[in-house]
Amino acid sequence: MVRLTIDGTACEAAEGALLIDALSAAGKMVPHLCHDDRLIPSGACRLCIVHVKGQTHPVASCSTEVAEGMVVQTRSDTLDALCRTNLELIAARYPRTAYAADPRHPFHRLLAKYDVPPGGKFEDGLFRDDSHPYLGVGMDRCVYCERCVRICEEVQGQFIWEMAGRGDATRVAISKGPTLLSAGCVSCGACVDTCPSGALFDKRIVSKPTAWTRTTCAYCGVGCQMDVGTANGRVVAVRPADQPVNRGHLCVKGRYAFEYNHASDRATQPMLRRDGRWQAVGWSEALDFTAAQLQAIIARYGSDAVGVLASSRATNEENYLAQKFARVVLGTHNVDCCARVCHTPSAKALKTMLGVGAATNSFDDIEQAHAFLICGANPTENHPVVGARIKQAVLKGARLVVIDPRRTELAALADVHLPVRMGCNVPLFNALAAAMIEEGRIDRAFLAERVSGFDTFAAHVAAFAPERMAEVCGVPADAIRAAARIYADSRPAMCFHGLGVTEHLQGSEGVMALINLALLTGNLGKPGSGINPLRGQNNVQGAAQMGCDPATLTGSQSISRAGPRFEQIWGHQLPTGRGLDVLEMMDAAKAGHLKALWVMGYDIYLSLANATATAAALAALDLVIVQDLFVNQTAEAFGTVFLPAASAFEKEGTFMNSDRRVQRVRAVVTPPGQARPDWWIIQALAARMGKPKGFEFETPQQIWDEVRSLWPDGAGLAYARLEREDLHWPCPAETHPGTAVLHRDRFFASKTAALVPVAYVPTSEQTSDAYPFLLTTGRGLHHFNAGTMSYRTPNAVLKPSDTLDMAPADAACHGLVEGDMVEVSSRYGAAILPLHISDAMQKGQLFCSFHRPDLLINRLTSAVRDRLVHAPEYKVTAVRVKKRDA
Ligand SMILES: Nc1nc2c(c(=O)[nH]1)N[C@H]1C(S)=C(S)[C@@H](COP(=O)(O)OP(=O)(O)OC[C@H]3O[C@@H](n4cnc5c(=O)[nH]c(N)nc54)[C@H](O)[C@@H]3O)O[C@H]1N2
Ligand SMILES: Nc1nc2c(c(=O)[nH]1)N[C@H]1C(S)=C(S)[C@@H](COP(=O)(O)OP(=O)(O)OC[C@H]3O[C@@H](n4cnc5c(=O)[nH]c(N)nc54)[C@H](O)[C@@H]3O)O[C@H]1N2
Ligand code: SF4
Ligand code: SF4
Ligand SMILES: [Mo]
């Protein structure tokens, strides 16, 4: 701490703090235009000037650090006069009409305060770009603070804006094209957020927010914190919060894609399917009907004839109740969630090898890593705020290796990009290990102290030398060696992986092969290192952790060990049978053993692989209860009961993000019509089933307190703490600070971890004359999974459809051009979509996303599943492509 005097009052500030922050902490607000906490200080506008004793001229407080004994004076006639002169210069071109139209705008208030009328050299309405659905551009109002240019460079890393021209002709311009859209803007809205003058603005704000509420983004697992603006019972605006996860940044989904919440086709009433048509009914009738049907099915076929699929989009509290309902009210362990299809392989591998099935490190470590290994993940589109942080770290000098068949945005920035052939991660990871061992690039001290099984492992991977694997993996041996050097030599190195690793026949084993690399190089247990699955939805980590998994209870605790404690607290015997996961439930339905399914916030017909098989399974069920915001594809095709759920904007609770943080979700508006929070619905059905005991919570907080009583590593995460602290579990007590980095001195379960030799088992999805291409499926920036939410927002304008991405050489060879409608067929089914020719693709390999409901891309994907935990192999399917005749 340093001591300073501000306007005669003694104050303290942290060493290295900016004077402007010390002033604001002392309640002395100085005007400023070019300053933003998120940016490197520029000191350009010279409005925040103050006197510092000993300095002949006033200094800009935004670019001056505090110093011991500093004596500061914030007001004087000289300062006021200087400030006014500076403002006059800044406002010389500012349009008078804009000023008159909105006197409450902060910049206009500043002009009024200093009595500086706008110069009006520009007429309002000059330099507009109307091409973007969200971002408005009216550069006549620009005051040349360069904040937009700087935030786009320093936070997002997109370099869309630039200062063009000189002197009086200086202006802000789009760097790479005539319009934002053609320039490749990713619509994060950071420039709008920082612009002080109104030159950049949100176009779609229909009414000014009357209240702002802090909550957590309901899309991806990054878990960005945001302030939601509401007016007249509607969400009208979203702004980023300056919190540790996202540091004042959001992506296009969090910031702009909220209009689904008030879509005209939001489901607002319970419905029953009668004579093939949905009929709206009251809650009472819907619940009575559902309870009676479930009871009849259980009476006839037993409890294990019913399954529950909980929602990774809903809160922890709701997921906890869903699995408790399955186990207590229905009497079955048949409960799962969509974690099964994405990162259960990661959880399995991490838990088996290191003792905790979750990311080892925190996003806060990104800035400490010297290198990144990104495997089968596309964070700049799928975890955009984390992607932007990684990009910034790389622009500042961190090394980067990307392993992905496609040249993603990060791959294009990488020191080494290994465009691995789809399905060949295991031989490639083994080749990296072989190179590290052969070249002696291993952490011997770490191996000696904390790792077992080295000799057997080294003998196993010796057969995978890069020179032998190059052909198999489709990447040159020297590139494999170069990648091994970067990861092994630039410690700490942080590994992030995604579905390109997990959604394979050898998904869990792929993650194990990756963990081996971290063990060999000592990249575990330290800040800036680790093995970090980039978890999918807002609360997929939480859904599984709450016990929506057939084999584990809340907190990932084993049924055999923790069961008695649950039985005691729940006052109920646990079922004795083995539960089915979602894929096994589909098999059981088709075989006639499963009769009823309750699907909460999970569009399985659209999103499970091999949709034809899913359809057959769902059609065989007697009862399909769908609980969702919308009549999704599952409900439309197979639902027998529909229960309308409240959205994340409409309820209280918590989400658990990708790096093990638990964060609050707060209600900002009331649910429409009869829609109710999932936790309310689950409790109401428990009551109708005659088992209200244990389902009589009045608030999500009460539910959470029960979770904490059952989950030792979450015991310290009280709501009161979540209000003010940023906490990662394990957090076993209310005095515990939480655990950002796992496995520091020892692994969770034991002192050492064992290297695991992983054999390579090729998938059955291989090319042939009939199916000459390999297709991988994944996601794009603008849409989210089943598309139910993002397609009900103007994101549909930004990206109207999934496309089939193909290498230019393949397109030429097949006589296809951009935009052609193509029919893609696999051994399982066919889909029709537009072609996009992309030089990010390798020859012989194709990519498409699966977001647009009507395209039902999963008709193409196969029946292959992960060998250990059954995640479907969404990432490799052999296909052929044919142009559709017009
Ligand atoms: N915008 C957006 N963001 C999302 C989502 C969304 O739908 N839209 N969904 C969320 C969810 S649920 C999840 S789980 C996450 C997923 O986030 P990611 O894991 O990033 O998702 P994907 O795009 O499915 O796949 C990642 C990458 O794997 C690559 N890949 C394919 N096959 C292989 C292979 O054999 N080996 C290797 N090494 N790579 C391969 C693909 O080319 C792709 O770039 O995203 C979350 N965030
Ligand atoms: N081809 C292919 N298919 C894939 C993948 C792939 O890479 N390729 N990835 C897979 C992966 S990783 C995943 S996670 C799945 C995701 O697939 P899904 O889980 O089916 O998709 P989501 O869009 O995340 O959301 C599911 C539903 O939740 C609803 N919802 C949102 N909020 C709430 C709420 O608070 N309560 C309730 N009750 N409902 C709510 C939405 O309206 C939506 O219908 O897709 C999988 N499918
Ligand atoms: S557009 Fe806004 S943020 Fe960019 S330089 Fe002009 S006033 Fe500053
Ligand atoms: S990065 Fe993820 S959590 Fe953050 S705003 Fe975007 S979708 Fe929401
Ligand atoms: Mo996912």
Image: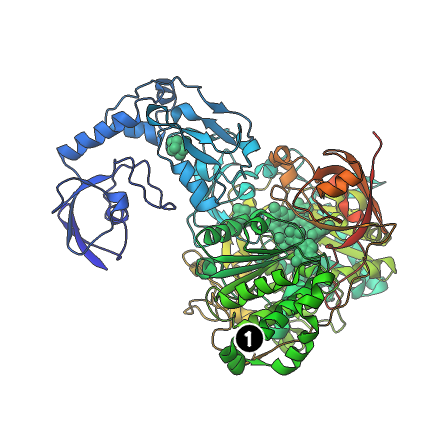
Q: Percent from the top left, x then y, of residue 60?
A: 24, 41
Asked which quadrant contains residue 658, the reply is bottom right
- In the picture, measured across the screen, residue 368 lies left or right of residue 679, that is left
Q: Residues within 10 Å of mark 1 (few under 14, many from 20)?
A: few
- In the picture, measured across the screen, residue 723 lies left or right of residue 331, that is left
Q: Quadrant of the N terminus?
A: bottom left
Identified at 59% across, 74% down, the residue is 437
Identified at 67% across, 75% down, the residue is 462
Q: Nearer the viewer, residue 333 or 834?
A: 834
Q: Percent from the top left, x then y, of residue 4?
A: 17, 53
Identified at 65% across, 63% down, the residue is 477
Residue kind at label 1, given as amino acid type: Gly
Relative to 25, residue 567 above or below: below
Q: Percent from the top left, x then y, of residue 476?
A: 66, 59
Q: Nearer the viewer, residue 507 or 254?
A: 507
- In the picture, measured across the screen, residue 821 lies left or right of residue 111, that is right
- Whether residue 313 is visible to the viewer of this picture, yes or no, is no
Q: Which residue is mark 1?
A: 440
Q: Percent from the top left, x then y, of residue 837?
A: 70, 39
- Whether residue 620 is visible to the viewer of this picture, yes or no, is yes
Asked which quadrant contains residue 61, the reply is top left
Q: How many marks?
A: 1
Q: Quadrant of the C terminus?
A: top right
- In the picture, measured across the screen, residue 746 lies left or right of residue 278, that is left
Identified at 58% across, 52% down, the residue is 538
Q: Secondary structure at mark 1?
A: loop
